[in-house]
Structures are given as structure tokens and as C-alpha cells.
Amino acid sequence: MNRLEKMELHLKNHPNDYQTAIAFLKYRSKEFDKERKHKQDQMRKDIAMYKRRLKSAE
């Protein structure tokens, strides 16, 4: 069980815990940004690899 799942479970049991709700939203946003950056970096690596292949094929 990861941190987001634990926070979500806590919020289900304690819906009025605004501090956890805020922390949950902030952490979820950071995780989303982290995943997006990882995908962008992977795409850049793939593009660089294809460019190298084209350059070496010439």
C-alpha cells in the first residue's frame, strides 16, 4: 500500500481531516507531475535514439 492509498483510506475514515485532504491533493499533484516528466524524458530519449540511427545510416 503506497502513500496515496493510505491517505485515501484515512480520508474515507476521517472525511473532516482537512490537513490530510490538502496533503493528499498536493502529493497527488506532485506524483502526476513526476509521471509526466518521466514520460517526456523517455520520449526525448527515444527521439534521440532514432536520430542517432538515421545519422549513422547515412
Image (tube, rainbow, N blue to C red):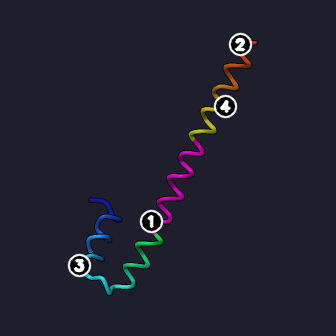
Residue range highlighted in magenta:
27-41
Can you tell which quarter of the image residue 46 is in? top right
Q: Secondary structure at mark 1?
A: helix
Q: Tell which tag, 2 or 3, sits nearer the viewer.
A: 3
Can you tell which quarter of the image residue 15 is in? bottom left
Q: Residue type at mark 3?
A: Asn
Q: Secondary structure at mark 4?
A: helix
Q: Residue at x 53, y 47 (%)?
A: 38
| N-term mark: 2 or 4 | 4
Numbered label attached to residue 28: 1
Residue sitting at the far right = 58
Q: How far from the left and from the top, in percent, is residue 19?
A: 39, 83
Cα–Cα span, label 4 and label 1:
30 Å
Q: Residue type at mark 1?
A: Arg
Q: How far from the left and from the top, in percent, is residue 20?
A: 37, 79
| N-term mark: 1 or 3 | 3
Mark 4, residues whose alpha carbon is within 10 Å: few (<14), some, or many (≥20)? Answer: few
- Residue 46 is covered by the magenta coloring: no
